[in-house]
Amino acid sequence: MTSLSDLSLVTQVAVLGNQKAFDKLVVKYQSPVRRFFLHQTGGDSQLSDDLAQDTFIKAYTHIRQFRGASSFSTWLMRIAYNVFYDYCRKVESSGWKVEGEYPTADISSSSPHLQPSTLKMDIHTALAILKPDERTCITLQLIDGRPIDEIASITGMPSGTVKSHLSRGKEKLVNYLKQNGYDRK
Amino acid sequence: MAMIENDNILLEQFFQEAATQQLEDNGFSERVSQAIERSAVHTSRFNLYAHLWTLFCIVVAFAVFLFTQGWNVLVTYATVFLTNVEVFLRTLPVAFDPAVLVSQFSSLSPQSSVLSPLFTILLSLMVLMVFSIIGLTRWVSRWV
């Protein structure tokens, strides 16, 4: 039902150029897309919103390329993933080191409404110990609840690579949580 | 096995709040909508400039055509082409006479005038096909 209504809205945008229909899709998917960026950027809400905006604009301008082979949500997240990695490449070329770091290490720049508790800060701190690919796979599975084949479709990685990223990422996270006493809570 | 299950439970618990977190819109959708409108205006302006440039190129090409008396060149080529067609049609019964064909091909005469109009027509058809394919491709690409 969800994908059917998405398909109907996408058709209205692609065929009739109905921007109101696209606005409905933005309202529906703004939360998962912005949340995805928040977790990739260490909770930088300003950067996350900018990247999410780029994602939706790209989705709007390329909506005719959506063939319905996957769900609209997967297609949108694939664009989000590409937008994030384009941004990473841009920042990396200006001196940022990708491995084990967020593109912006300044977690304090996050806005208060997105950082209400210490737990969220802990999640960003925990995710910071992962490599970018591991972080992406972990957030897509453990936070967005996506299956491995969907993660593979979003990231363009083979399923085996996704599985190994998940396995390594989980191992690192479990060790981190145990070291910080989360297993005793 | 039990340890792996415990680890998975630990991770699920750790990410539980983040998994159920719904971010408030806070005007985000409105900002996206405005950005899309700005982007659409930019795109339409770009298309307008592209059309104006195309029009300019057409006008320049037409002016060059007039100044270099391109019409005379076209008339000359058309006359030659039509003459070739006429020659071909007049010699058609002879061209397809097996006896004549055999004699012409066996002698391999360089002055054979029978194949020339045929070659002209085939060449014209090929050129016409190439232009049709280019035109069709451009027309399709506009709608895809």
Image (cartoon, rainbow, N blue to C red):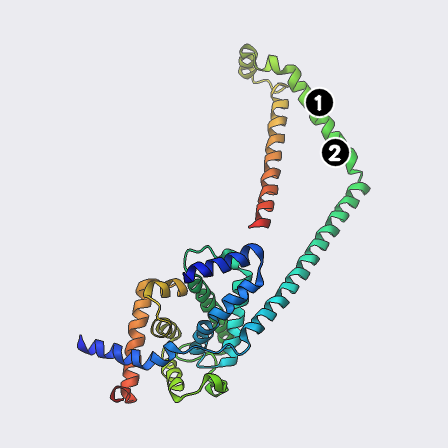
Query: What residue lies at 77% left-to-right and 42% top-to-bottom?
Result: B65
On the question of residue B44 being in view, the answer is yes
Q: Which mark is residue B83?
A: 1
- Image quarter (top left, top right, bottom left or bottom right) of the C terminus of chain A: bottom left
Residue type of the residue flagged with mark 1: Thr
- On screen, residue A129 above or below B54: below
Sequence-first tag of 2 and 1? 2
Name the mark on residue A67. Answer: none
Q: Is residue A76 left or right of residue A140?
A: right
Task: Say the numbered circle drawn on residue B74.
Answer: 2
Is A179 or A181 nearer to us in this picture?
A: A181
Chain ID of residue with mark 2: B
**Residue A172 in view (yes/no):** no
Instruction: Say left or right for A179 vs A154.
Output: left
Q: Quadrant of residue B127?
A: top right
Disc 2 residue type? Leu
